[in-house]
Amino acid sequence: MNPYVLTILLSSLGLGTTLTFASSHWLLAWMGLEINTLAIAPLMAQHHHPRAVEATTKYFLTQATAAAMILFASTTNAWMTGEWSINDLSDPIANTMFMTALALKIGLAPMHFWMPEVLQGLDLLTGLILSTWQKLAPFALIIQTMQNIDPSLLTLLGILSTLVGGWGGLNQTQLRKILAYSSIAHMGWMVIVIQYAPQLTLIALGTYIIMTSAAFLTLKMSLTTKISTLTTTWSKSPMLASTTALVLLSLGGLPPLTGFMPKWMILQELTKQDLPIIATTMALAALISLYFYLRLCYAMTLTISPNMINSTTPWRIQTTQISLPLALFTTAALGLLPMTPTILMLAT
């Protein structure tokens, strides 16, 4: 892609998110979301592959539907209350419709069906943008309006997302689909606690972005998109294989890795709010997700590539890719747990 065009598209992505962050008026927030959608569409379709074009079309249709629902909800709210301000979403029908539209935007269950299919059709870097940056603007709107949204709706979306994210990833062989289901499960964790402690949602979102970036950049470095090709990683670059296994376990939420921090604090908060059944359900749903992360770790570190050719496996992989972002994200994904008190203090 032409570097000037790429610069314009990435700037528009930044502009759309910033506009939504800064807006207090519904139309400005909607405009920011639309700029975001239109800026990422050419990035998704840049390889002109049928799968990429199909993924772009699916993404555009779902995002356009969600944007239309947001516009309809805000117009309904303005009709009923006379207010266009984001903080005055007091009409119950409008705020339920609005939450449903944002759930469709970020891929919360049961509005998650587009997410694995779209991510499967994209290259890894665009998939990374879709899984991380594109979640920021809708989450900013959810945090601003959460006091008006029905708590039982948020709880239902959160539990459904963690369960679907766990169950959906169990039978997958494509790594991008596994990461999509992982994203759905993490979104569920963030949404369930947003009504009680929004700062924990921000911490969970930050750690999710760090861990997912590390996972996508690792897959890009080793040029891997399937579990069967993941099995050759250990012979090509053993150090990368060992750090990838740890990043995946961090995504699963195992201590003493960074991924344990948000899950620990969210479960603690749910218990404080006298919701032990919901906390137990979330912890058990996290175990289902942990199974497919362990499956990836097993495939990568303990198995040999299934091939019928009696040739020696290449020992080292020569790459021209920049490895600094990968190193930074991997370090952050593995070692931020001791910083928990500092992070909590900064968040509150």
Image (cartoon, rainbow, N blue to C red):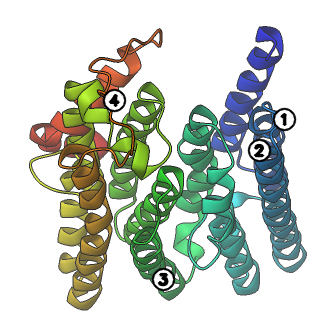
| Structural distance between the alpha carbons of marks 1 and 3 | 43 Å
The residue sitting at 48% across, 31% down in the picture is 223
Q: Which tag is nearer the camera, tag 4 or tag 1? A: 4
Q: Which tag is nearer the camera, tag 4 or tag 2? A: 4
The residue sitting at 43% across, 60% down in the picture is 182
| Structural distance between the alpha carbons of marks 4 and 1 | 35 Å
Using the rendered view, name the quadrant where residue 254 is placed.
Answer: bottom left
Using the rendered view, name the quadrant where residue 88 is placed.
Answer: bottom right
- What amino acid type should be assigned to the residue bearing mark 1? His
Provide the residue designation for mark 3: 151
- What amino acid type should be assigned to the residue bearing mark 2? Ala
Number of the label disc, if any, that sits on residue 311: 4
| Structural distance between the alpha carbons of marks 3 and 2 | 37 Å
| Structural distance between the alpha carbons of marks 2 and 1 | 7 Å
- What amino acid type should be assigned to the residue bearing mark 4? Ser
Tell which of 290 and 309 is nearer to you. 309
Provide the residue designation for mark 2: 52
Number of the label disc, if any, that sits on residue 48: 1
Contact? badges 4 and 3 (CB < 8 Å): no
- What amino acid type should be assigned to the residue bearing mark 3? Pro
